[in-house]
Image: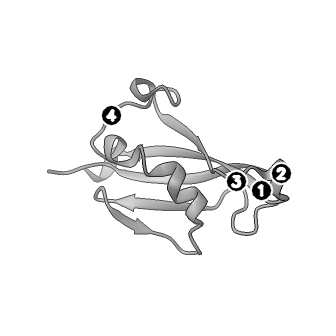
């Protein structure tokens, strides 16, 4: 069964994130293979984990209540206001051209 790849892109950084900058991205290929050109922050991964299976199976973002018809928005778990770190907002897109 073919599943859409997911592209996860940084769209906003609140505070100072030591890993990501706006525009950085990574992919989940074939529903389970992480592809990244840079380090992957575990805070980012924990934000994605509850949703990646549903998204990889083609569930529309609005069904999950996390975005519009094309994009899911997720935020990492770092409470930057208390830690001095950075909270990152990600846009997740289902890439249906690889199906």
Residue 78, numbered label: 3
* Residue at 32% over, 34% down: 59
In the rendered view, tell whether residue 49 sits above or below residue 19: above
Marks 3 and 2, how far apart at CA: 9 Å
Looking at the image, is 39 positioned above or below residue 49?
A: below
10 Å crowding of disc 1: few (<14), some (14-19), many (20+): many
Please identify the residue farthest to the left as the structure is shown. Answer: 1
Mark count: 4
Tell me if label 3 and label 2 are in contact, CB under 8 Å.
no
- Residue 24: quarter of image: bottom right
Number of the front mark, 4 or 3:
3
Callout 2 crowding tier (Cα within 10 Å): few <14, some 14–19, many ≥20: few
Q: Tell me the distance, in whole angstroms, between the alpha carbons under discs 4 and 3.
A: 27 Å
Residue ID for mark 4? 59
> Local crowd at mark 4 within 10 Å, few (<14), some, or many (≥20)?
some
Q: CA distance from mark 3 to mark 1?
A: 6 Å
Answer with mark 1 or mark 4, whichever residue precedes in sequence: 4
The residue identified by callout 2 is 82
In the rendered structure, the answer to whether residue 18 lies left or right of residue 66 reads: right
On screen, residue 69 versus residue 59, left or right, reads: right
Q: Position of residue 56 (x, y in %)?
A: 32, 47
Residue at position x 51%, y 36% in the image = 71
- Left or right of 83, for residue 62: left
- Residue with the most extreme bottom position: 38
Say which of 75 and 38 sits in front.
75
Q: Residue at x 51, y 26 (%)?
A: 68
Helix, strand or loop at disc 4?
Answer: loop
Q: What secondary structure is marked by label 3?
A: loop
Q: Which mark is residue 42?
A: none
């Amino acid at each position: 069964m073919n599943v859409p790849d997911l592209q996860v892109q940084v769209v906003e950084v609140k505070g100072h994130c030591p890993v990501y900058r706006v525009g950085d991205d990574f992919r989940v290929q074939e529903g389970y293979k992480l592809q990244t050109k840079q380090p992957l922050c575990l805070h980012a991964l924990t934000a994605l984990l509850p949703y990646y299976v549903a998204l990889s199976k083609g569930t529309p973002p609005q069904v999950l209540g996390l975005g519009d018809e094309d994009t899911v928005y997720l935020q990492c778990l770092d409470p930057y206001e208390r830690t001095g770190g950075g909270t990152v907002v990600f846009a997740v897109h289902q890439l249906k051209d690889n199906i």
